[in-house]
Image (cartoon, rainbow, N blue to C red):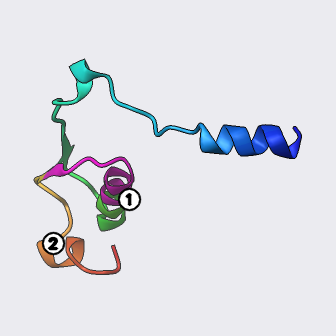
Amino acid sequence: MNKKQLKKDVSDFQLTKIAPEYQNLNFTIVLNQSEHAGNIGSIARLMKNFNFNNLIVFNPMESVEVIQSRHT
């Protein structure tokens, strides 16, 4: 690809847009009996990367203190 084409492609770039019928969808991720706090942390980081906001941790095997620690 030459420089002119590359410059044109960069200047014409548009962010990916969400189709109108999908703009108001809400998802809640539910984790049931997670065995390790690291699993919850991994899911939380993944959710942040994809702009998911609702997480429910139901009946975790770890204590709340461990789950909320920075190590997770």
Q: Position of residue 6 (x, y in %)?
A: 77, 42
Q: Position of residue 47 (x, y in %)?
A: 32, 51
Q: Is residue 54 above or below residue 44?
A: above
Residues under numbered marks 2 and 1 in contact, where contact means CB atoms less than 8 Å apart: no
Is 21 rendered above or below residue 25? above
Q: Is residue 42 above or below residue 28?
A: below
Left or right of 10? Residue 65 is left
Residue at image x 65%, y 44%?
Answer: 10
Outermost residue, top side: 21
Type of amino acid at the residue the image marks with label 1: Ser
The residue at 25%/22% (across/down) is 20
Q: Secondary structure at mark 1?
A: helix
The percent position of residue 72, horizontal first and vertical second, equals 33, 72
Give percent across and percent down for residue 65. 15, 78
Instruction: Specify start and end residues of the magenta stretch as a single range.
Output: 43-56
Mark earlier in primary sequence (2, 1): 1
In the image, 27 versus 10, the foreground residue is 10
Mark 2 closeness class: few <14, some 14–19, many ≥20 residues within 10 Å: few
Q: Nearer the viewer, mark 2 or mark 1?
A: 1
Disc assigned to residue 69: none
Q: Nearer the viewer, residue 68 or 59?
A: 68
Instruction: Report whether 39 appears left or right of 23.
Output: right
Residue 42: mark in rendering: 1
Q: Which residue is mark 2?
A: 63
Q: CA distance from mark 2 to mark 1?
A: 17 Å
The image quarter containing residue 45 is bottom left
Q: Secondary structure at mark 2?
A: loop
